[in-house]
Image (cartoon, rainbow, N blue to C red):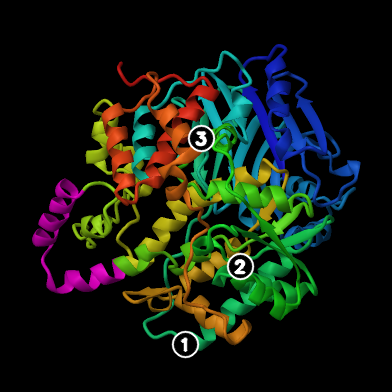
Amino acid sequence: MCGIIGIGSTRPLGELPWMLVGRDALIHRGPDDAGTYTSDDRRVMFAHRRLAIVDLSPLGHQPMAIADNSLWLTYNGEIYNHIELRAELEALGHRFRSTSDTEVVLAAYRQWGRDFLTRLDGMFALALHDVRENRMILARDRAGEKPLFYRLRDGELRFASELKGLFADRDFERVVDPAALDCYLGLGYVPGNRCLIAGVSKLPAAHALEFNCANGTARTWRYWDLPAYAGGASPDSQALVEELEALLTGAVRRQLVADVPVGLLLSGGVDSSLITALAVRAGGRLKTYTVGFPEYADVDETAHAAFVANHFATDHTVLAVDMPQPDILTKMAYQYDEPIIDSSMIPTYLVSEQIARHCKVAIGGDGGDELFGGYYSASRVARLEQVSRYTPLWPRRLLASAATHLLPTGVRMRSALRMLGTDLTGDLPPISIQLDEKARSGLIERKPPISAEAVRAGRVPAETDAVQRMTRYDFANYMAEDILVKVDRASMLNSLEIRAPFLDREVIEFAYGRVPSSLKATPKARKIILRQLAKRVLPAGFDAVRKQGFTIPLDRWLRAGPWRAHVEQVLYDPDSAFSRSEVASLFAGLDKGRQVREQLFGLTLFEEWRRQHGVELPLHS
């Protein structure tokens, strides 16, 4: 795993001292090595920080070139099928100097051109400079596990793994995009290619960008998409469970390959327990790690994890976590240089910090909920689909409108009632899980609701049933822009690589192309096919129905003590972007037991973020 940064221009570039500063601002992503590349015509510059995982020798140094220096690559990620690709490329006449997957990526591009991306199975963000064609290519993996920000302006393309790399240039404009802020407050993240910084874009997952260094033109394209469901009306559920077991076993086996120690993240839930079972089957006795909150039994999962670890005789470690001091928000705001509203970034960071003391690579269960309908929203839309068969849309919309206007933010069942107004015959629209339009309008100067562009980015076409669309929505939006962002930033701040077998290409394509909604979620059950697989590979007595998110007791922390004082100090600051009276209303709701802890967390994180990075607010322009 690594950090990358670079620039391409239609004009020769002078000395750019900020490039090295930006590279080293990413040192947490790659503490093992550093490198730079400048093209002969000085129109392209790459800089790299390396976390050595495969081929630890100097032969894995980046940026890397092919033998004649006509092709250069700076790359962040892992290609899990690099061994198979290497054999195929060798049969086609390519020769390799190292065992690094980086060299395989270079050879794949030289052999197959732009189509090389369809051959890669892994997590990656990369930049190529094709000297012969005088072009640069940026690309991200299918799920969006690895980040890539860029700015295209005045014949110049700048890119980096994290915004802090671009912020190393003190003249880089840092102004909030109001439409992106509206998305952040409504969804908890910024979807699509938008960014909280105006003028900056995120390269979407499964996309590539080509920049012409001669004339400054650029084009983006999608090189892969989720397959349409083609499983038939009456699939054989037993055969599908067996096929999933085989695919997931293969993915786990590929992701266990590394030249450094590998550990397993074990929460005791279905997803991580399945990965542990299959990893032990593939790789013998392995190390497992669980984070525990001994002072808070209702969010502590150590007993469930220990049950699985004992059965599979793993080398198990429990990492006890006490309540952190609120200044951890300052650290999170720096690392999440495009923030998300998800307080589970804190335990994710804390467990990554502990695990990084033992190993460089960890394997987790991310993706299982999104692919197979593990969230309550999947059951909710299944229930809504049933209701819509005998209840017209207009009374449901009246009830949803009443819930919006009469029930305060954070009241239980408010979001479920608001969802009743969704028209399932059309596109599935973005779902405001944090602050709805009414709440947002009071927090900041009135702006249009979530922008049309962002709405298009978040919508899922009405091409399948509601559960299939919900899982597609979660894959393209919540997983890509929240879950994977959380995991990448928290782990990389600790120079730890986290891998996700559920996001293997074959597993993804199976989940969406072959698994029917009846094996994902119904009004009363979720993640059905995974629970059936759990019965095959997990011990008797395992609780496959239990669903507990990776949470912290944030509501209790915010009611009193140092966390309450810190958050109030930040949000009641005269320079705050948010209405003091609306913030006070959220605190009052918290004290009455309403579910507004995430909203207060998100507002605080935003304020800490913009002050640390010197981001300006154009809210009164």
Task: Say what amino acid the circle numbered 1 marks.
Answer: Asp
Magenta-drawn stretch contains 177: no
Q: Give the magenta part as a residue range.
A: 381-407
Q: CA distance from mark 1 to mark 2?
A: 26 Å
Query: Residue 272 got which mark?
Result: 2
Question: Mark 3 and mark 1 in contact (Cβ < 8 Å)?
Answer: no
Of residues 310 and 439, the one nearer the viewer is 310
Name which quarter of the figure residue 180 lies in: top left
Q: CA distance from mark 1 to mark 3?
A: 44 Å
- Residue 40: percent from left, percent from top: 78, 21
- Residue 240: percent from left, percent from top: 52, 82
Q: Residue at x 71, y 25 (%)?
A: 45
Residue 452, compared with residue 620, is above or below; it is below
Task: Say what amino acid the circle numbered 3 marks.
Answer: Glu
Considering the image in quadrants, where does the C terminus appear? Answer: top left
Q: Is residue 188 visible?
A: no
Q: Looking at this view, name the residue that lies furthest to the front.
A: 561
Please identify, in this view, whether the residue under mark 1 or under mark 2 is nearer the observer. Answer: 2
Please identify, in this view, whether the residue under mark 1 or under mark 3 is nearer the observer. Answer: 3
Residue tagged by mark 3? 338
Of residues 539 and 183, the one nearer the viewer is 539
Crowding at mark 1 (Cα within 10 Å: few <14, some 14-19, many 20+): few
Comes first in the chain, label 1 or label 2: 1
Q: CA distance from mark 3 to mark 2?
A: 27 Å
Comes first in the chain, label 1 or label 3: 1
Task: Say what amino acid the circle numbered 2 marks.
Answer: Ser
Residue tagged by mark 1? 236
Q: Residue at x 47, y 85 (%)?
A: 237
Name which quarter of the figure residue 38 lies in: top right
Crowding at mark 3 (Cα within 10 Å: few <14, some 14-19, many 20+): many
Q: Is residue 211 visible?
A: yes
